[in-house]
Every structure is written in structure tokens, then in C-alpha cells.
Image: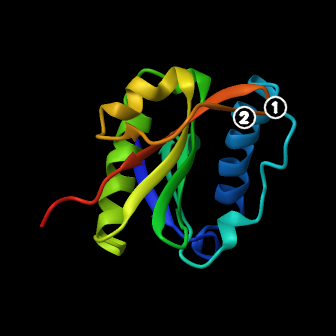
Amino acid sequence: MPEFRRATVSEIDPLTLYRILWLRVSVFVVEQKAAYPEVDGRDIEPGAELLWCEEDRAIVATLRILRDDTAMRIGRVATAESARGRGYAAELMRAAIERCRELEPGLHIHLDAQTQLEHWYERFGFLRSGSPYEEDDIPHIPMTLAVRPQ
């Protein structure tokens, strides 16, 4: 049975944090062949939180929430290849959106989607909010989930 969790880096036991970072590196650096600093310092910024899904003590999906100056930000959405198609990332996205709304209900939520996932993010209400660009030879599109009307 999958378990969904959320915590700041300082609240996560070292082995779990290692497994979260291992998954991100496995997906973004190894699988997608993008050589970049995955551990970028943003995970330890004030207000940053990691969300993850554990199944049989393995980290099978993860993402992070950040606070930018004028918006919340969701990023580093990753699912282990063996766990794809089970809805774990979707469950984490719903939880992340809810958490962003809880923390800062008056702020938009931004993310930078890999272009092939634009329609997946649209399922959660995100809309294209800028021009396509490439990062590490991977096409991306900025997307925003607007503040809910009061």
C-alpha cells in the first residue's frame, strides 16, 4: 500500500532523503541524459517542502514545493519507471496544489513542464503562461495555476 508523505529537508531522515534524491537523479540526470546540478540548493530554502510516495520502503514518486517572491512553485516531479501509470504523481500533484493553497492562498502556482507533459499538467488546471524554451536539450513550457476566485 503506497504511503504519501510531506516534510522539509531537515525533518526527513537521511536514508529517505537519499532515496528521494537518488530517484530524482535517476530520472532527470541518468534516464533523461541531462547533466546538470540536480541538487541545486533550493530544497533547503525557507518554505521548501518535499512530497513523496513510498511503496514497500522504496521511494517511487516525488516532487517539491518552493516559495518564489510572488508565487508558489511545484517542480522536480519524478516517478520511478517501475511505478509509472499508477497515479502516484497525480496524487502528489493534488496534494502539492492543496498545500500551496493552504500556505499561500493568494498566490499563483508556477511550474516548468517538459513539453510532452503539458496536457498532463492541464488536468490539474495549469495553463501555458509563456513561450517554449529548452533546458538541457529538453523542450519545456512555463505553466501557471491561477489563484482561485474568492
Instruction: Give residue 8's mark.
Output: none
| Mark 2 Cα-neighbour bin, 10 Å: few <14, some 14–19, many ≥20 | some
Q: CA distance from mark 1 to mark 2?
A: 6 Å
| Mark 1 Cα-neighbour bin, 10 Å: few <14, some 14–19, many ≥20 | some
As drawn, 53 above or below 26: below
Horizontal side, residue 62 vs residue 28: left or right: left
Q: Write down the residue under mark 1.
A: 34
The three-letter amino acid code for the residue at tag 2 is Phe
Residue drawn 61% across the image and 32% down it: 140
The three-letter amino acid code for the residue at tag 1 is Ala
Q: Position of residue 134 (x, y in %)?
A: 71, 31
Q: Write down the residue under mark 2.
A: 28
Query: Mark 1 or 2 closer to N-term?
Result: 2
Q: Position of residue 100 (x, y in %)?
A: 37, 64
- Front residue of this view, candidates 91 and 117: 117
- Front residue of this view, candidates 1 and 61: 61
- Front residue of this view, candidates 82 and 99: 99
